[in-house]
Amino acid sequence: MNKQHFLRFDALAPVQSQKLTVFTFVAKAAEVARIARIERAGRDDVGTLQGFQRPQIAGHIREIRDYLEKPNSILPNAIVVAFMGRARLEPAASPESRLCQLVIDTSNGPPGWIVDGQQRFTALSELRSRDFEVLVSGFLCETEEELQKQFILVNNTRPLPKALVYELLPKVGDLPHRMSNRSQAALATEALNYRKGSSLRGLIKQQTNPKGVIRDTVLQRVIMNSLSDGALRLYAGEDKLLLDHGVTMMSEFYHAVQHVFAEDWAGKTPKTSRLIHGTGIVALGYVMDFLNSVTGAATRDEFASGLRLLSGKTAWSEGEWEFGAERRRWNGLQNVPSDVRQLSFHLVQVIKRRLAESARAA
């Protein structure tokens, strides 16, 4: 058989299982594409499950590829590949040595199955430089049942909590655009939670501050919305300006919220007041943007003046919300897009209407 169909790799084979042979080796992006393939989960004509991989996530693949194109990129986490035949280990001369030769037969196409790392695998196939080297961890198994079992076990590990990932983002530079937006929001949230003099100091619940009452991801949504098209839009991509001016303005706004709605804030939790709940926090973010845009509010007194226009039109911790002909119990609002949209529209319209009435009276 043509020797070009056989790929050889120096491998390291740790002793882990009496049943399965495990090994790790280094391969170039072009070589990985020759030895492994993705088998997507699907059903054949009689309904039998075939394969096991989820659909590709194009945006995720693009982010990985764009990152790997950068000169200082690294990919330390290995791609995991399973082989059922057409691959063998040739042991080293010394029985004590863990070094060996992995020989893979590619004459009938890639023999390996991607068990973990399919997005990375696809991104590697799209690199301009196919010489980028990656770590590959592999194992030999005899049956498809064993392969599927290992797939489940490998992919059933618990990921890092999103909240912790978001807390770590501000410490990292050169991130994909999606993460950069979240990174700015996390940076501002961190400042609001720990900066001396902040009206929200210690009140934001984070992995590192579990006693807080306002979820950090909720406040990050407020900041991301505002950075996109609100009072903070001038600070998008400008961390120093956001920390110097944006965080100060937000602190002033929430100081006003705490004083105008004191009974609905002090000592409350998301369960006892929708003012502290994600629904109210996000909706009030739109109020902050509106007041800043229409009245130029930036200080606690200026924001408080606008918030007082909501007097008699809120039901943060008791009573009912009156949304036109519809009535909703105070705790009937949930942190879902439709309820946030309804509450935001109600609050902004009340302020807009009363500002217009004041202008006519003047």
Image (spheres, rainbow, N blue to C red):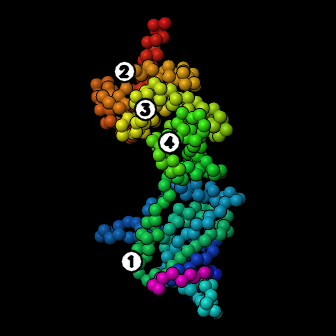
Closer to the chain start, of discs 3 and 2, is: 3
**Which mark's residue is nearer the viewer, 1 or 3?**
3
The one of 143 and 109 positioned closer to us in this rendering: 143
How far apart are the alpha carbons under marks 4 and 1? Answer: 47 Å
The one of 311 and 23 positioned closer to us in this rendering: 311
The kind of residue tagged 2 is Gly
Name the element at disc 1.
helix
- Residue position marked by numbered label 1 in the rendering: 145
The kind of residue tagged 4 is Ile
- Residue position marked by numbered label 4 in the rendering: 204
The one of 58 and 183 positioned closer to us in this rendering: 183
**Which mark's residue is nearer the viewer, 1 or 2?**
2
- Residue position marked by numbered label 3 in the rendering: 265
Closer to the chain start, of discs 1 and 2, is: 1
- Residue position marked by numbered label 2 in the rendering: 312
- Do the CB atoms of the residues marked 4 and 2 lie less than 8 Å apart? no
Main SS of residues in magenta:
loop
The kind of residue tagged 1 is Glu
Q: Quadrant of residue 280?
A: top left
Q: Percent x, y for residue 10?
A: 64, 81
As drawn, 90 above or below 54: below
Image mark count: 4
Q: Quadrant of the N terminus?
A: bottom right
The one of 221 and 189 positioned closer to us in this rendering: 189
Q: Quadrant of residue 226?
A: top right
How far apart are the alpha carbons under marks 1 and 3? Answer: 56 Å
Q: Percent x, y for residue 305?
A: 50, 19
Closer to the chain start, of discs 4 and 2, is: 4
Mark 3 surroundings within 10 Å by alpha-carbon count, few (fewer than 14), some (14 through 19), many (20 or more) = many
Q: Which residues are magenta?
A: 12-20
Q: Percent x, y for residue 175?
A: 62, 51
- Do the CB atoms of the residues marked 4 and 3 lie less than 8 Å apart? no
